[in-house]
């Protein structure tokens, strides 16, 4: 696949801090890419650099091989779905969607109708944004950008304004929409579950830099840094070895020789519905969590147990 | 937290705020000349409406207020937008200063300025100088109101317009300006009432042909009691009250 | 953006520089000139006008003006606070009550001042009523004194105090009041220990918004004070009209401006909030 968007050692410095620091990133044509990181890691600044709302201090941004770093937002074939959706409050749904079409010289009629149908906005077309539900607003924001058929669609935490029940449903719809349109999506989020469930590839970002890029499986199972490992899911640490709670087993007696095992004492046992989290402390002092099936006999605080795991589940990551 | 007597106090406070005007309005219908009630009559309204000096002054006031409001609202809106984009400390300070400058000082300084200019050009005080003076003191009010509106506006609204391909002017004209509409209307209403009401500055910079309604009212009021003033006051209060009410309704819908 | 921004700023920059700053600059130049025979002015350059501003006679007027403004401002605070408190706790009718406070502001200041003349003068409503009720025989001297001026100022600027107070009180989380009474505080103690400290920003804003216009007031002292109570606004006006002493009038004007600016800087700068 062709690279559609490339960030080449891009930096953005604000007085007193480096929001984005020598960042490299390549998006392939037609993929769903997630940029994942905690708040303040520079992911929104990265998006604003790509959209053209900020100018990079250093480095180059290329869209289909063309340098675009110095172009104005309206000169780039990139569109954004804003976190607040930023629908124009004085314009109807139709006028919102048509807003950009007059500047991009689009084939008009057909494109509008196709988009409206794809996002199921047909019966809302003459309403004002204030008369729409949260989910409908999000679909208008998507329609307004998608109708322009951008090379890349940027989505800035577009699910954060929705209520939690709707969020999971919309994840699937977004992924489906991306497949159908074939447009490259760059999705920004701080929610690792969102990133893992939606993306073809994802990048973990921290302190202005990309820590790791890869498929969700790669990054979850083979994190290359401690930060990436802990940001994607909980992790138990013994020195520089990490073991995920779901790979950790609990046994009353030492298991066989071909596995790693550690004696520990149970501190608490938490029933979570679909599973049980056993909180224990190793004799060496480290806290440990094991996720065990709820069918297992219940462990009580004070129980002396053995925690064990397969050597293949170990991740060796020295502290940074 | 329940504090006894607060409601009773509020009644007294509202009485203090509204009774003087209410009494004034009531006595505008008094048929007698003095503050003794002698019966209902419209004679002072008739007298006011037959007074050509008053009518001319009212017309002058309206022309000045409309012109000053239009100019101040335009300049102030553009200024607020530019300041919202990027702060300009000296201009903000100067506008704040103009807001707290005592009217008498502003009036005197404008008079000094106009006299100084007119020494070089053969122009005289008149409607144009009054309009310019009014624009000057209305400007900061417009900037404050519009800037406050801009600050509560979603920042990404304009970025969205740029993102969808609109240029900077188009983004301003098609997105920001309509979103600012109610704010600009409120600012214009404020500018209009301040301009229509001003006496101190106007009296300094007005020429012989540009006597305004407040100037005539002031002159009559200084001379002593005159029920005609009550009648004019009643008409102004009702007209401005209606204007405010209509704009409130307009803003709610 | 920079080109559009410059274009947008041009009208207001021109207005501000030409019609606000330049006129003040002209006054500044005038303060160093000598008054001529027929109201004109010219050389020699002098500091005499500034020296005269510090003359005990004029300092007295300044002190009196500051006192009148301070008394009016404090009265506005004392009268306005309970009203703002009432409105902030009025529930659904808040907006109506607030509108009733602002309404007089939308009617002409001149008319509001005239309304008090109508009430207070010797043949005014109050005296007429008092005499016809037989309470007094001669009309009370209600108008044209210091008290009438303070009354007019309080009446004129009370809304300026109530609005910021209301805004500050409105922001106080009602849970805080419940928490306070839950912890055993009597309503008055809640008022003193929770509400008052939290409304401090509103009090500060109200003090600025009322004190500054009161200090430079001209219309109210002129109409309600008559010729008797000379305050600084009247003093300035006199220098330009009857006394025809522009250089000295300019010096007094700029001294007043300086006082206002110092006040604004002390009150607003320390707390980092500005009017704009």
Image: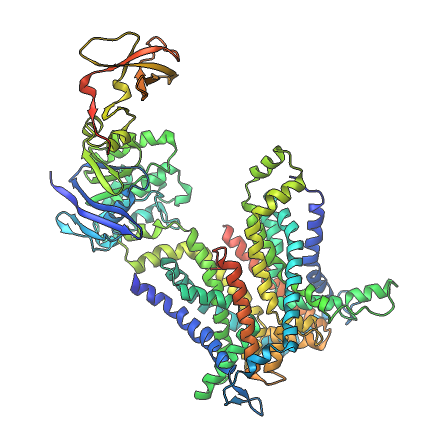
- Asked which quadrant contains residue B171, the reply is bottom left
Residue B182 in sight? yes
Which quadrant would residue C62 be assigned to in this image?
bottom right
Q: Determine the residue located farthest toward the bottom in the rendered image.
A: C37
Residue appearing at x 64%, y 39% in the figure: B1
Residue, x 28% and y 39% (percent of image)?
A188
Identify which residue, A124 or C149, lies in the foreground.
C149
Q: Residue furthest left?
A: A1
Residue at x-position 40% and y-position 56%: B178
Residue A206 point in image, percent of width and height: 26, 39
Residue A108 visible in the current orientation: no
| Residue A113 coordinates in the image, percent (x, y) | 26, 42
Q: Is residue C46 left or right of residue B80?
A: right
**Residue at 48%, 80% in the rendered image:** C26
The image position of residue A284, as x and y in percent, is: 30, 19
Going by the image, does A105 lie left or right of C160? left
As drawn, A193 above or below C249: above
The quadrant of the image that shows the C terminus of chain A is top left
Q: Is residue A34 above or below residue A282?
A: below
Does residue A148 sit above or below C138 in this rendering?
above
Q: Give the quadrant of residue C133.
A: bottom right
Where in the figure is residue B234, as x and y percent of width and height? 66, 65
A155 relative to A128 in the view: left or right: left
Q: Quadrant of the N terminus of chain A?
A: top left
Looking at the picture, the colour scheme in use is: rainbow
Q: Residue furthest front?
A: A284
Q: Nearer the viewer, residue B177 or C260?
A: C260
- Above or below: residue B52 compared with residue B177: below
């Amino acid at each position: 696949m062709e690279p559609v968007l490339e960030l080449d050692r891009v930096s953005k410095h604000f007085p007193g801090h480096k929001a984005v620091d020598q960042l490299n990133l390549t998006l392939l044509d037609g993929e769903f890419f997630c940029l994942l990181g905690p708040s303040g890691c520079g992911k929104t600044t990265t998006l604003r650099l790509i959209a053209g709302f900020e100018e990079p201090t250093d480095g180059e941004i290329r869209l289909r091989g063309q340098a675009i770093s110095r172009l104005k937002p309206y000169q780039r074939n990139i569109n954004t779905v804003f976190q607040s959706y930023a629908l124009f409050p004085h314009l109807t749904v139709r006028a919102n969607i048509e807003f950009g079409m007059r500047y991009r010289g689009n084939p008009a009629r057909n494109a509008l109708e196709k988009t409206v149908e794809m996002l199921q906005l047909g019966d809302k077309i003459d309403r004002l944004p204030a008369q729409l539900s949260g989910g409908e607003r999000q679909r208008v924001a998507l329609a307004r950008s998608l109708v322009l058929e951008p090379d890349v669609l940027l989505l800035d935490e577009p699910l954060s304004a929705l209520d939690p029940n709707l969020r999971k449903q919309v994840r699937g719809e977004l992924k489906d929409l991306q497949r159908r349109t074939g447009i490259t999506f760059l999705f920004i989020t701080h929610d690792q579950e969102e990133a893992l469930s939606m993306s073809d590839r994802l990048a973990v970002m921290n302190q202005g830099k990309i820590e790791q890029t890869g498929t969700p499986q790669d990054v979850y199972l083979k994190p290359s840094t401690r930060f990436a490992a802990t940001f994607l899911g909980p992790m138990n640490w013994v020195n520089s070895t990490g073991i995920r709670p779901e790979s950790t087993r609990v046994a009353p007696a030492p298991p066989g020789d071909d596995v790693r095992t550690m004696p520990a004492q149970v501190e608490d046992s938490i029933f979570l519905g679909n599973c049980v989290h056993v909180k224990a402390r190793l004799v060496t002092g480290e806290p440990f969590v094991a996720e065990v099936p709820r069918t297992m006999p219940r462990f009580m605080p004070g129980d002396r147990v053995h925690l064990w795991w397969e050597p293949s589940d170990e991740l060796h990551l020295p502290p940074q | 937290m329940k504090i006894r007597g607060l409601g009773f106090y509020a009644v007294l406070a509202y009485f203090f705020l509204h009774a003087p005007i209410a009494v004034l309005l009531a006595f505008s219908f008094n048929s007698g000349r003095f503050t003794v009630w002698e019966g209902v009559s419209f004679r002072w309204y008739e007298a006011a409406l037959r007074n050509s000096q008053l009518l001319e002054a009212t017309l002058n006031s309206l022309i000045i207020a409309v012109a000053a409001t239009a100019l101040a609202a335009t300049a102030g809106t553009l200024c607020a937008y530019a300041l919202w984009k990027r702060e300009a400390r000296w201009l903000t300070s100067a506008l704040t200063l103009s807001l707290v400058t005592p009217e008498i000082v502003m009036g005197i300084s404008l008079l000094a300025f106009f006299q100084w200019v007119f020494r070089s050009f053969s122009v005289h005080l008149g409607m144009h100088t009054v309009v310019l003076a009014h624009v000057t003191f209305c400007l900061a009010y417009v900037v404050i109101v519009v800037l406050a509106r801009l600050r509560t506006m979603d920042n990404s609204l304009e970025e969205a317009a740029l993102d969808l391909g609109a240029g900077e002017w188009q983004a301003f004209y098609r997105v920001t300006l309509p979103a600012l509409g109610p704010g600009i209307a409120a600012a214009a209403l404020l500018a209009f009432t301040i301009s229509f009401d001003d006496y101190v500055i106007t009296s300094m910079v007005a020429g012989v042909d540009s006597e305004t309604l407040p100037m005539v009212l002031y002159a009559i009021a200084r001379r002593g009691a005159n029920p005609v003033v009550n009648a004019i006051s009643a008409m102004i209060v009702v007209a401005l009250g209606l204007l405010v009410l209509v704009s409130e309704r307009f803003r709610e819908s | 953006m920079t080109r559009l921004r410059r274009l947008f700023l041009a009208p207001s920059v021109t207005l501000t520089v030409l019609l606000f700053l330049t006129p003040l600059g002209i006054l500044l130049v005038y303060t160093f000139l000598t008054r001529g025979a027929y109201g004109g002015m010219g050389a020699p350059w002098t500091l005499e006008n500034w020296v005269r501003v510090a003359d005990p006679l004029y300092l007295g007027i300044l002190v009196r003006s500051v006192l009148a403004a301070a008394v009016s401002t404090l009265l506005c605070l004392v009268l306005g606070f309970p009203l703002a408190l009432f409105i902030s706790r009025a529930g659904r009718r808040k907006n109506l009550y607030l509108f009733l406070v602002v309404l007089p502001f939308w009617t002409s200041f001149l008319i509001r001042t005239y309304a008090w003349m109508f009430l207070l003068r010797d043949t005014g409503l109050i005296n007429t009523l008092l005499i016809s009720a037989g309470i007094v025989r001669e009309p009370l001297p209600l108008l044209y004194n210091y008290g009438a001026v303070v009354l007019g100022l309080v009446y004129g600027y009370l809304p300026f105090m109530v609005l910021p107070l209301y805004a500050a009180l409105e922001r106080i989380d009602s849970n805080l009041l419940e928490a306070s009474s839950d912890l055993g505080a009597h309503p008055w103690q809640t008022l003193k220990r929770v509400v008052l400290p939290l409304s401090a920003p509103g009090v500060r804003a109200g003090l600025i918004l009322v004190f500054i216009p009161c200090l430079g007031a001209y219309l109210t002292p002129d109409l309600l004070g008559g010729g008797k109570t000379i305050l600084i606004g009247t003093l300035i006006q006199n220098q330009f009209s009857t006394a025809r002493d522009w250089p000295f009038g300019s010096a007094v004007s700029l001294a007043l401006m300086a006082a206002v600016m110092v006040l604004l800087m002390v009150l607003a700068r320390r707390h980092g909030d500005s009017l704009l």
